[in-house]
Amino acid sequence: MANMSLKKNEMPTQPADVRNTNFSEVALGYTPEQAIDEAKRCLNCKNKPCVGGCPVKIKIPEFIAEVAKGNFEEAYKIITEDSSLPAVCGRVCPQESQCESKCIRGIKGEPVAIGRLERFVADYHNANSKEEIVRPQSNGHKVAVVGSGPSGLACAGFLAKKGYEVTVFEALHVAGGVLVYGIPEFRLPKAIVQKEIDTLKALGVKVETNVVIGRSYTVDELMADNGFEAVFIGSGAGLPKFMNIPGENSNGVYSANEFLTRINLMKAYEDDAITPIYRGKSVVVLGGGNVAMDAARSAKRLGADVKILYRRTEKELPARLEEVHHAKEEGIEFNFLISPIEVLADDKGWVESINCQLMELSEPDESGRAKPVPIEGAIKNIKTDCVIVAIGTSPNPLIKSTTEGLDTQKWGGIIADENTGKTSKDGVYAGGDAVTGAATVILAMGAGKNAAEEIDRVLSAK
Amino acid sequence: MYKIVKKEKLNPTVTLMEIEAPVVARKAEAGQFIILRVCSSGERIPLTIADYDRVKGTVTIIFQVVGATTMLLNDLEEGEYICDFVGPLGRATETEGLKKVAVIGGGVGSAIAYPVAKKLSEQGCEVHSIVGFRNKDLVILEEQFEKVSTKFVKMSDDGSWGEQGLVTNALEKLILDGEKYDRVIAIGPLVMMKFVCMLTKKYEVPTVVSMNPIMIDGTGMCGGCRLTVDGKTLFACVDGPEFDGHKVDFDQAIKRSRFYSDFEAHKREETCNLLKMGEKNNG
């Protein structure tokens, strides 16, 4: 019997005024009863519009049907046929603009909570499965994966299951890429990422941390001297963009990458951490994406009053809906149609305030999008002792500059075929943010998987 | 884990360590740096490569005990291990085509100036080394500099080693005596590098400095090491660490170097107390 409630089952969360003082996970996940009840909202449509909204085409109605029957392990198997990181994607995918945006139930009422169900299934499996991971027989082919973020992990996982000898090279001291240094613990517990990496290791994947490809080894050396027959580059988009406004190098001005890395990777929020973090009292975050939300909510947890400044309106915020919603609940103040023009500092170089240009929306242009334009003379000064710049990142140029024959876009993205990950260089594949610029975990994961399939096709024919 | 194969105290606060890190050693060049983490809860700190041995697979670092991390590092002995050691990072010193260079080293910065002087000397360049310390007790690498320098000028603040005065006094004297340098390479405290650059700008001698700002990843990811060069924001980790000294905004760099000074002073004291407690318990 279908559940005809117009609303999703709410997912239990820590109360807002409690969680904004700790770094534990905000959302607590469905109980089995809640999951079954929510799964029954799915109409199991014949044409499956939700699947069309999923970048990796998870068989959504099929897995939900198993959840409705209480067959959670079966549901897990169905998801993992297409996705290698369900516990991660269930938490960080922008479902409202992907699968859930296409859900028929969303026409009248709320869509089925596909993301929450995916998360439930993955967590249930991780907590209850006693399945031993069997290391596949080696097929003798060696593949190198550069970067241990979502695209690299997906690529490595797929190839390892097919018997490839995969080595993942990671520049930092921990594997996981943006899942570890970027996304905070309260949104994606690091134990979940570690579990994925442990699974890969059990499948035989070697993870070499502290190796910077482009410096420690070049891509050519990996292939010529180290016996790798193919290299997948999933080095992400790690280079922070700045506003290029006066005063931006003042003390107290962070890139979101630096602020979040200090907190997530280096655990600077813990009392006994050796890595320092500057705890501003009145923090201003520039930007409106997920990273801006993560930075703002982290600053709040360090005890600050936090304002987000975004140059468009709430409607255009690129962040996941749930993150915006959580940020508001936690007491983050949003300021729209405002754009910083200058950071002002005291004589010791510490930020004191920020001057901002107020904006208004223009008439919609040909694409139907209204652009923010400055209101002449409307300048606002905001007092602050810490500014976090979260306006985006671009691909790291290190691999491009050290790999001959690897073509890139003008803005630095590696040119790679969308379906196969093939680059201009023989045997070299690429995917994820290194190709697309900053995008989502699920797209990166899909790209890693596509490249792995192509690598398998080419190498198995050898 | 990376093994400490040699430890040597160069002076009361400066220590040399040779670390087993073959992946770093095989590509290391003068001017580049590494990032290390002493223990699993430790911070990442950058240190410039002082020397390397590709055959043995080791990299030499020389550090001054200034904060919590260098204190923990200094507490380790030969045969013990550090948690992480990654590199080589940054760009190598460009020495091609140089015929006559003044290499300036100040304090522990001399440890980084030395491999540059050595590399220049090996390629047949005339090297004038001007090295300064506060006093004779803090002198490091004296013999080494002697070996690779055509001219070696020793300076100290109190006159207890070489001449009394600053490295800038010595450099100006040499320039006024008619020495013509293709380049000055200055490595030391920010204030020293700033004044060297002011001087060489006056005499129009191209000058390169090595910046060692606060950084986390060392691969261009955090932007903590950013500095203004010729009005543009650059990252020391990927664009440097060496820059045209006449274009660096030193005043900003000096302010940025004090970003965490309060925190660091506190951590240093805490770590010091912890280590003392450990000694008591062991003793």
Image (cartoon, rainbow, N blue to C red):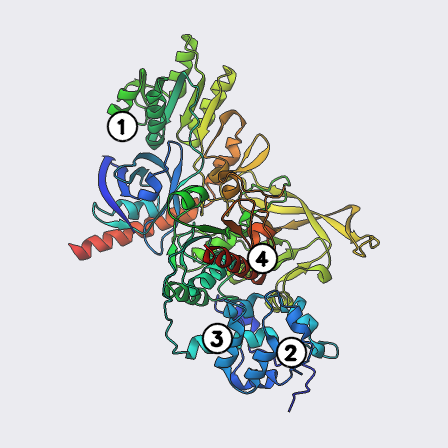
Q: Which residue is mark 1?
A: B141
How far is disc 2 from disc 4 in space, using C-alphas?
A: 26 Å
Mark 4 belongs to which amino acid? Val
Q: Is residue B151 above or below residue A431?
A: above
Q: CA distance from mark 4 to mark 1?
A: 47 Å
Q: Amino acid at mark 2?
A: Val
Marks 3 and 4, how far apart in space? 24 Å
Q: Earlier in the sequence, mark 2 or mark 3?
A: 2
Look at mark 2 in the image and give the residue it sits on.
A112
A323 over A335 or under it: above or below:
below
Q: Considering only order in the chain, which callout, 4 or 2, is on the residue closer to the N terminus?
A: 2
Residue at image mark 3: A123
- In the rendered structure, the answer to whether residue A364 lies left or right of residue A206 reads right
Amino acid residing under circle 3: Asp
Q: Residues within 10 Å of mark 1 (few under 14, many from 20)?
A: few
Residue kind at label 1, given as amino acid type: Leu
Q: Are marks 3 and 1 in contact (CB under 8 Å)?
A: no
Query: Which is closer to the viewer, label 2 or label 4?
Result: 2
